Image (cartoon, coloured by chain):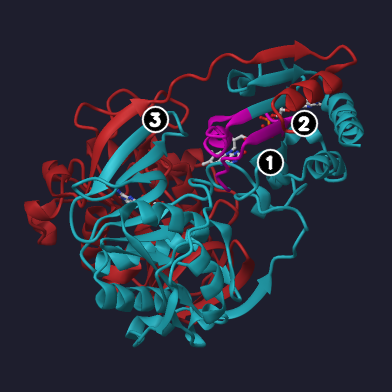
Amino acid sequence: MSLRIVVTVKYVPDATGDRHFADDLTVDRDDVDGLLSELDEYAVEQALRIAENSDDDVEVTVLTVGPEDAKDALRKALSMGADKAIHVEDEDLHGTDAIGTSLVLAKAIEKAGYDLVISGMASTDGSMGVVPALLAERLGVPQVTLLSEVSVEDGVVKGRRDGDTASEQLQASLPAVVSVTDQSGEARYPSFKGIMAAKKKPVTSWDLSDLDIEADEVGLENAYTKVESAAERPARTAGTIVKDEGEGGKQLAEFLASQKFI
Amino acid sequence: MAEVLVYVDHVGGVVRKPALELLTLARRIGDPVAVALGEGAADTAGTLAEHGAVKILTHDAAEYAEYLVVPKVDALQAAVEQVSPAAVLVSSSAEGKEIAARLALRIGSGIITDAVDLQASDEGPVATQSVFAASYTTTSRVTKGVPVITVKPNSAAVEQAPAAGAVEALNVTFSEQATGTKITSRTPRESTGRPELTEAAIVVSGGRGVGGAENFALIESLADSLGAAVGASRAAVDAGWYPHTQQVGQTGKTVSPQLYIAAGISGAIQHRAGMQTSKTIVAINKDPEAPIFDLVDYGVVGDLFEVVPQLTEEIKARKG
Ligand SMILES: Cc1cc2nc3c(=O)[nH]c(=O)nc-3n(C[C@H](O)[C@H](O)[C@H](O)COP(=O)(O)OP(=O)(O)OC[C@H]3O[C@@H](n4cnc5c(N)ncnc54)[C@H](O)[C@@H]3O)c2cc1C
Ligand SMILES: Nc1ncnc2c1ncn2[C@@H]1O[C@H](COP(=O)(O)O)[C@@H](O)[C@H]1O
């Protein structure tokens, strides 16, 4: 048997950089270095572990929708150990929202062929955490999301989802869409060998016409939501900072009392 | 007046606080119609009516507890078809966002997640969001379909606003996808007796500086002296000192309390993402250069093992 895993990975601006909005109120991707979203490394990691633990023939494809530079994210995933990559790139994609992105991803996943889709829990820039659910809805397959533990055996995916009020064990038949949290297991670092091997792995490029998507189904103009304003949060006014010389706790209590917290 | 659907998060009929906050926001846009599903759904009616629900649509079936997310989407879609609302509001829990997203796709609507405020306008509700680790504030609108908006806890006050609150049964036919993902077992989270992290007025968090699981007792005592919830940084959670459910930050919970106290936490961007909108911020850290001090209203440079116990004692003494 064979198992085809597609891992969706996003190329995002570095969260530790100074992130801004561009004039059209989309995320400015020019000023800040981009990278593979750290939360998607966990998705790649779980795909590789499933492959390593399986007797089946497993093929791991990483898929991104993003600008030219998004190839960096694919390279990173390939150097971790994924087998091949797909890059969906098209000028008309600029400014596409979650609904549109999920359309493009779903079409690409179907074209690539899949048994299992693995996504991150959320992207580190938009961090909506909705794309995996949208993919399951579009593909018409079970959604097995926000797993901190995942396993695949005999065409069934199982996992643990730690929710607000309970921890749940989930189970679904393949094909399915899974998303994994940062509790699922530390992601590996690419080895030197992995980095060299990645240079030779195939990266397929598709544009909208390859996916039979019309320009008016995606992009900023056709988004389902509109950002009307973006303002930098005013810097917090500098607070009082005291050095503890034996009375620090009491001074803090005095402050809390002055603010009516005690 | 237009009706606004409010999805009610409840546990066995006990309405969770974020759902009541949604009713406050819904009343700015129209008449709130609540949707409560699953076991105890009808028991929510009294509370919901007191807080402004003109109508409560309820439905109970085993599917809601036995299968993930989709049965709730089916029900909410049925409610949208029955009511033709001006907007649909859901609270921004992990599950809430997934329900909202799938609903939006089905009804051809746009979705906004994690709103921290909501105002009516001629062109529909305008949502305020806090993005890039809360360094930017944006306003957005849904431009297609019935706006579906998820709202973070603590974004509005709970208000009494008695309304009719007539209970009506909702007619739900489950889709083929509804039974796709089976919940084979469920272990409820043990109650700590402390307030819910995302709902608490005061949160006291500990980080790597706390130095060990056993030392979290110090953080808990301080929290208890203030009636606060306890949070933790990812470093403390990854070390196994405190449960992940209590993690504050990008991959944990977002909190926005009246008072946030950080002890032994450096203030990394991913931690700030989860607490930066707190009203008053206080930190105790032995490193005067720790980035957390850029955020504080009051900071103590010192050893938390000295400062925290003294603070706890002083609070207890003052409270008598
Ligand atoms: C994708 C991603 C997601 C993440 N999500 C989160 C998240 O949700 N939440 C989160 O918190 N982090 C998150 N992180 C991790 C984050 O980057 C930091 O590593 C983490 O917040 C550090 O935790 P800390 O402040 O407790 O530890 P440190 O950064 O190690 O800081 C410990 C602090 O304690 C002080 N200290 C030590 N001893 C004492 C003492 N005796 N008294 C007083 N002070 C003392 C030190 O001076 C130091 O400032 C994420 C990272 C990534 C990449
Ligand atoms: N442009 C994209 N390309 C590939 N995968 C994406 C993209 N956007 C989102 N995803 C996937 O969906 C997950 C959740 O993203 P989001 O809903 O944007 O927070 C991410 O962790 C990715 O796995």
Q: Amino acid at mark 2?
A: Gly
Give the quarter the ligand 1 occupies: top right
Residue wearing tag 3: B136
Mark 1 secondary-structure assignment: strand
Name which residue lies at 65% across and 50% down.
Answer: B197
Q: Amino acid at mark 1?
A: Val
Closer to the camera in the image, A7 or B170: B170
- Extent of the magenta region: B253-280
Percent x, y of residue A209? 8, 56
Q: Is the residue at mark 2 in contact range of ligand 1, meaning its CB lies under 8 Å from it?
A: yes
Name which residue lies at 45% across and 44% down.
Answer: A194
Q: Residues within 10 Å of mark 3 (few under 14, many from 20)?
A: some
Closer to the camera in the image, A62 or A142: A142
Q: Are marks 2 and 3 on the same chain?
A: yes
Percent x, y of residue B262? 70, 32
Question: Which chain shows up in red?
Answer: A
Spatial CA distance of label 1 from label 3 is: 23 Å
Mark 2 secondary-structure assignment: helix
Spatial CA distance of label 2 from label 3 is: 29 Å
Majority SS type along the magenta span: loop
